[in-house]
Amino acid sequence: MKLVEPILAFQTELQAIRRDLHAHPELCYEEVRTADMVAERLTAWGIPIVRGLGLTGVVGIIKNGTSNRAIGLRADMDALPMQELNGFAHASTNPGKMHACGHDGHTAMLLGAAHYLATHRNFDGTVYVIFQPAEEGGGGARRMMDDGLFEQFPMEAVYGMHNWPGLAEGSFGVVAGPMMASSNEFRVVVRGKGAHAAQPHRAIDPVMVAVQIAQSWQTIISREKNPLETAVLSITQIHAGSATNVIPDEAELIGTVRTFSTGVLDLIERRMNEIAGGVAGGFNASVDFSFKRNYPPLVNHAEQTAFAIEAMRAVVGHERVDTNVEPTMGAEDFAFMLQEKPGCYVFIGNGEGEHRTGGHGLGPCQLHNGSYDFNDNLLPIGASYWVRLVEMSLPASA
């Protein structure tokens, strides 16, 4: 492993930053303290900043040499609305809020890279370090773009990184093409006619209609979608009724659809709507169908992925980079950026949880779990990857 030595020497401060952020989590578009810390650090290191894109976003501008070339490096800053189960010293001090996805670590790693790049400037061009709000369902990437991110900071490529529990500490994973799924949600209200449960013949039972719809929808996945294409249709909530002896007027189905391609998503949305309406009509009921597309699939660009692989190998070695990591049906709003700019998103291994200090929760060290904690051993690894990516992308003049 070939880590950048000055970053290793800076690791203690990076850990302090990371743990301070962990102790003070902020939800999407509320990252005021976090953004203040990022802005103060960048400014202290002589890095010009622009604030306000995406409401609480921060962009640092690190220039060197004469080249007009530029790339972007992105980290997310927001926490999750959940209670932390850990009791160690840097546990959340904000009840009901927790850095359970490692965005505190992502922010610290990018700050570590920014500090080194500003101090050594062994590159020719411009690096934009992008600290993004509201990844956890708020679409902060899209909002920064709507506020002019790529117009105000023109870049030829953009890169992102996420810690990945279960992937060995000191390793990376990536795959060209689809790596994370689209995130979509649906809500269907079946409208029937209520009656006494002892007189079902006087009712149009929306519960039974909802059951038929739920079962029929699964045939879209098993019989209509190309089996070589990947998709998930999960009904996660069913709501109906208020008493054991009453057939209700309405029943509700709520859930999520995940796909790796827009074409498959188009098929699923269309057929869900058609099947729901057809089944309901067959029982003299009606439906209100709504489908919301949240995040698109995250698709890595081949050229930038190959380049990122070389940068990762330069840091951790050939054998520690999995270039065919298993894609996940989880979603990530960095996908919006990759729709507009070529780039690559990689996983950095967070290990199995052995890094957690005494006082951690009894649950697994998995993302979105109350016992999770970011592995501070990754801080110099991730920051070194960012630096090597910059120096290889924007080589200094001889």
Image (cartoon, grey):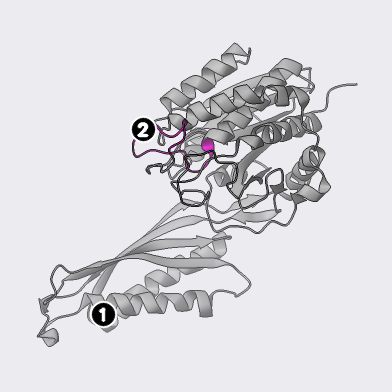
Q: Nearer the viewer, residue 39 or 144?
A: 39
Q: Residue at x 67, y 45 (%)?
A: 169
Q: Nearer the viewer, residue 123 or 225?
A: 123
Numbered range of the magenta stretch? 87-103
Q: Residue at x 63, y 24 (%)?
A: 12
Q: Which residue is mark 2?
A: 94
The residue carrying pointer 2 sits among few (fewer than 14), some (14 to 19) or many (20 or more) residues within 10 Å by Cα, namely some
Q: Is residue 323 above or below residue 152?
A: below
The N terminus: image quadrant: top right
Locate residue 382: give its quadrant: top right
The residue carrying pointer 1 sits among few (fewer than 14), some (14 to 19) or many (20 or more) residues within 10 Å by Cα, namely some
Q: Position of residue 8 (x, y in %)?
A: 72, 26
Q: Residue at x 32, y 74 (%)?
A: 277
Q: Amino acid at mark 1?
A: Met
Secondary structure, mark 1, is: helix
Secondary structure, mark 2, is: loop
Q: Position of residue 223 (x, y in %)?
A: 52, 80
Q: Position of residue 148 (x, y in %)?
A: 53, 30
* Badge number at residue 208: 1
Nearest-to-viewer mark from 1 and 2 = 2
Q: Nearer the viewer, residue 276 or 33?
A: 33
**Which residue reaches farthest front?**
358
Q: Amino acid at mark 2?
A: Asn
Q: Is residue 327 above or below residue 38?
A: below
